[in-house]
Image (cartoon, helix red, strand yellow):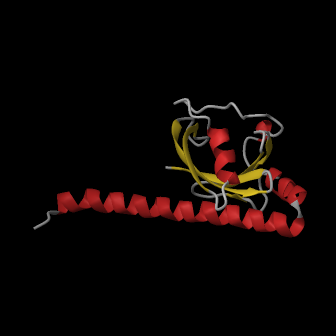
Amino acid sequence: MLTRSFLIPILICLAGSLGAQDQQAKAKALVKEAVAFAKTHGKEALVKETSQGSGRFHVKGGDELYIFIYDAKGTCLAIGFQGTLVGMNRFMAKDPEGKYMVQEIIKTGQGKKGGWVDYKYTNPKNGKIEQKSSYVEGLDDWAIGCGIYK
C-alpha cells in the first residue's frame, strides 16, 4: 500500500512534468505561427513584429515566451527579449558547458522538420544559469525559435 508521504513527491513531479510539456507545446506552436506569419506577410514583417518585444510573438505571463531569429551565419536578426543582441553575430557563442548553442540552433533549423536544442542559458527572471530547450524551425536561410527553461 502506498503511503501519503510517498505519493506527494510523485504527484509533485508529475505536475511539474505536465507543466513543462505544456510550455513545450506553447513554444512549438509559437514558432509554427511565426513561420506561417512570415510565409504570408514576409520575413521583414516577422522581424518587425518579433522586435517589438510586446507583439504577437512575445507571450507574457508565467514563463515568458518569445521568438528569436538567426540567419545562417549566426547573426541575430530579431529577438523578443534582449534587443541588444540584434545585429550581433553569435555563431561562436557557447553555453557554460562549451556547447556552441547558436550553431546547434542553426543546424537544427536547417533540418527538414526542425526540432529541439538543449543548452544552458541565463534565466532573465532570476539571473541563474539554467537548462533551456528551444524549438527551432527553418525558413529559407533563417532559424526561427522559441525557448523554455526546464
Residue appearing at x 80%, y 51% in the figure: 141
Judging depth in this view, the residue of 127 and 103 nearest the camera is 103
| Position in image of residue 115 (x %, y %) | 60, 56
Residue appearing at x 52%, y 65% in the figure: 22
Residue 15 horizontal side relative to residue 57, left or right: left
Residue appearing at x 43%, y 64% in the figure: 18
Quarter of the figure with residue 137: bottom right
Q: Residue lying furthest left in this view?
A: 1
| Position in image of residue 64 (x %, y %) | 63, 54
Q: Is residue 96 depicted above or below 12 in this figure?
A: above
Q: In which quarter of the image is the N terminus?
A: bottom left
Q: Residue lying furthest front in this view?
A: 112
Residue appearing at x 27%, y 56% in the figure: 9
Judging depth in this view, the residue of 73 and 18 nearest the camera is 73
Picture mark count = 0
Residue 124 horizontal side relative to residue 56, left or right: left
| Position in image of residue 83 (x %, y %) | 78, 41
Q: Is residue 83 depicted above or below 92 in this figure?
A: below
Residue 108 horizontal side relative to residue 9, left or right: right
Judging depth in this view, the residue of 99 and 25 nearest the camera is 99
| Position in image of residue 65 (x %, y %) | 65, 55
Quarter of the figure with residue 40: bottom right
Q: Is residue 63 depicted above or below 121 in this figure?
A: below
Q: Is residue 117 depicted above or below 42 in this figure?
A: above
